[in-house]
Image (spheres, rainbow, N blue to C red):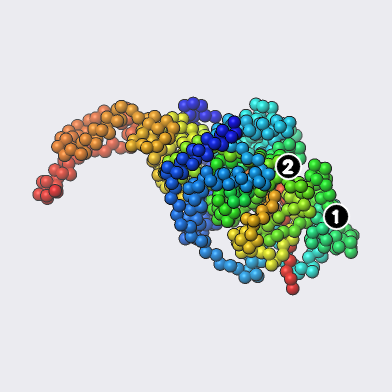
Amino acid sequence: MNDASRAQILKRLHAATQQQPVDTPEMADLPVELLTPPQKIETLKAHMEAVRTEVHVVAARDWTKLLKKILKKRDLKTLLYAPGTPVGSEVQKAWAEEPERLPELVSYKDNIENFKEQLFDIDAAVTSTVGGIAETGAVILWPDEKEPRLMSLVPPIHIAILQAAKIYTTFSEAIQAEDWAQKMPTNVVLISGPSKTADIELTLAFGVHGPKELIVLILKDE
Amino acid sequence: MSNDTGPNFQQNVSRALNDKQLRKNFKFAMGNFILKRKQIFSDESKTEQLRQVGNAIKRRVLSQLPQLLEELEEKCTRNGIQVHWAETTIEANQQVLRIMNAHQATRLVKGKSMVSEEMGLNEFLQQNKIEVVETDLGEFIIQLNDEKPSHIIVPAIHKNKQQIAEIFHQKLADTPYTEKVEELNAIARRILRQKFFNAQVGLSGVNFAVAETGTLCLVENEGNGRMSTTVPPVHIAVMGLEKVVEKLADIPPMLRLLTGSATGQLITTYVNMITSARKPGEKDGPKEVHLIILDNGRSEILADPQLRQTLQCIRCGTCLNHCPVYTRIGGHAYGFVYPGPIGKILNPQIEGLKKAGELATASSLCEACAEVCPVKIPIPQLLRRLRNESYASGSIATVKDGGYKKNVIETIGWKGWEMMNTHPHINAIGNKIMSRLGAKIPKIGPLKQWTRYRTAPKFAPKSLHQLVDEEGIQDE
């Protein structure tokens, strides 16, 4: 049944495009003004703050100190992190040095089928990013075995760590520079802010299904 | 919702026009959308460039649509996404059910999808004892109230918060009445989190499917789309076959056009790009991903060199927002899945002119939709074309029920008009008769209709020819 439908549909489509070819216009490239590194940070920060993301620019060696400060202010019980990633290792190290008044570190230790109950109960998660997009304001997440997809979605607070050097001016630039077309993973997600909706009278409200807070730390090498 | 002869459009329109609350809700929301779009597309020449690119990308897609779909299928299959083809909505529904049954699944969570509305998927699955939960907040609201979307982006926009508060209070157990939007959102969050947690299958639409990589792109703000496509062990994506694009590099401009046109956003909260099912070693994401590619008349639309432009649509809804007719009557009055200008050209082609052709008449051809369309679909031109097709005047097309309005009196009338205007002598006689008797023609039948809101023109005592002659000017 399925194969027959496939054949019929493709037959009609082939006939349509062969009998009456579609004329295709030349495509002009869109002009882009590449931003300087400081401009990229500023632009990304401004756009993301406009959709209620909390953005901090911090010296690379100090970021875990800032993370601790942010978390202490919120009085959380658990923080989901990814051991074995550069971000995860630094978190682990920082927690070992001074664990007081900090949320307990939890890792995504099992498949979702066995971890779901615990996952839906976690207060916050910290993840890495593979880059940012200045022009629209977004971070790029590239989840993998160590850093599963739901880390950035289920916990009410998501903290994303972004290297300043990995901010691109445009989305197109990011796709080209990293040759995405050759290596698309299971899932890539761009995130610009906390979950939001305007479905009731266009009144903007945050934290519908995903995180209620998105906190981005932009790490600058001094 | 619509039967064989189509909904009673005239009646729906009168009812909508008399509903003050409804008109107020739409006027407010559409005005807001227009303003937001303007802010995001403030530079006219840049916006025009971007629209040119959007148009070119979609035309390039249409020029090689079968090849791109074959490539998409190949890449998806290679990545472990199972591809299904459906000629009709019935077939697509059955494919969804078959997948559900294969997993003995009875609980489905849905992200927002207009194609699933086109399929009538919810009704079909419920008849088959499957619990279907809409998880987009707007869709959740109208599902509770057993309604259809009135807008393709903000489906519950016809309701104000008092009405929504009442729906929540009535339909959800232990829910006190509250008009606070934050509280209403929190109620939905609490209930739906449990649904995500327990769902066996998640279903979503597709905004763009990239042939080059076999990637499904989903755009959203709430996170319910990511929940539906990541938490349950099975994900089913449904798409109209026109949603394919050639390359990954096409996504950034299309995305800008979509989010800017739809909600006046630079980018949505989430852009979710799915290229495969869960791979060995990965800890979450569905173990099975299915893609259902739906035709439902689209391949026939592609055969017509003019009407095929309908397939460029990316479902942003901006033509609804800018339409003076839509703004006054809202989405339900149209009586079909796709409301507004895009619906006026799409529904008649999918459902046939007999059933939906009347929609094409509900336009003043003001061109607002064409001016804002991100992929430059000349909607007013296509509306005129469909009106002509209704009478099958000079048609080469295969629009379903073409010529359904053709009738003897009109045909004779137009033939007579043609003769009068191509034969000078008959024209002169005709003019003389009309100048004496024109005012006395009784206002019955179509003339009565026509003069209901218009003043009948007065025939001049002398024709232009005569006047020119009398002035002594040679007109030949």
Q: Which residue is mark 2?
A: B287
Q: Nearer the viewer, residue B15 or A118?
A: A118
Badge 2: few (under 14), some or many (20 or more) residues near its Cα, within 10 Å? some
Number of the front mark, 2 or 1: 2
Q: Which residue is at a point 12% across and 50% down the rendered structure image?
A: B473
Q: Is residue A154 above or below residue B191?
A: below
The chain ID associated with circle 2 is B
What amino acid is found at the position of numbered circle 1 in the picture?
Leu
Badge 1: few (under 14), some or many (20 or more) residues near its Cα, within 10 Å? some
Q: Which residue is at a point 73% across and 37% down the rendered structure image?
A: B199
Q: Nearer the viewer, residue B290 or B44?
A: B290
What amino acid is found at the position of numbered circle 2 in the picture?
Lys
Residue B59 location in percent, x, y? 48, 49
Q: Which residue is at a point 43% across and 30% down the rendered structure image?
A: B354
Q: Is B456 displayed left or right of B352 in the figure?
A: left
Residue B352 location in percent, x, y? 46, 32
Q: Residue furthest bottom?
A: A222
Q: Nearer the viewer, residue B147 or A82?
A: A82
Q: Is residue A49 above or below residue B98?
A: below
Q: Nearer the viewer, residue B189 or A171?
A: A171
Q: Which residue is at a point 89% across and 64% down the rendered structure image?
A: A97
**In which quarter of the view is residue A68 placed?**
bottom right
Q: Is B54 displayed left or right of A220 in the figure?
A: left
The chain ID associated with circle 1 is A
Q: What label does residue A105 carry, if any?
A: 1
Element type at mark 1: strand
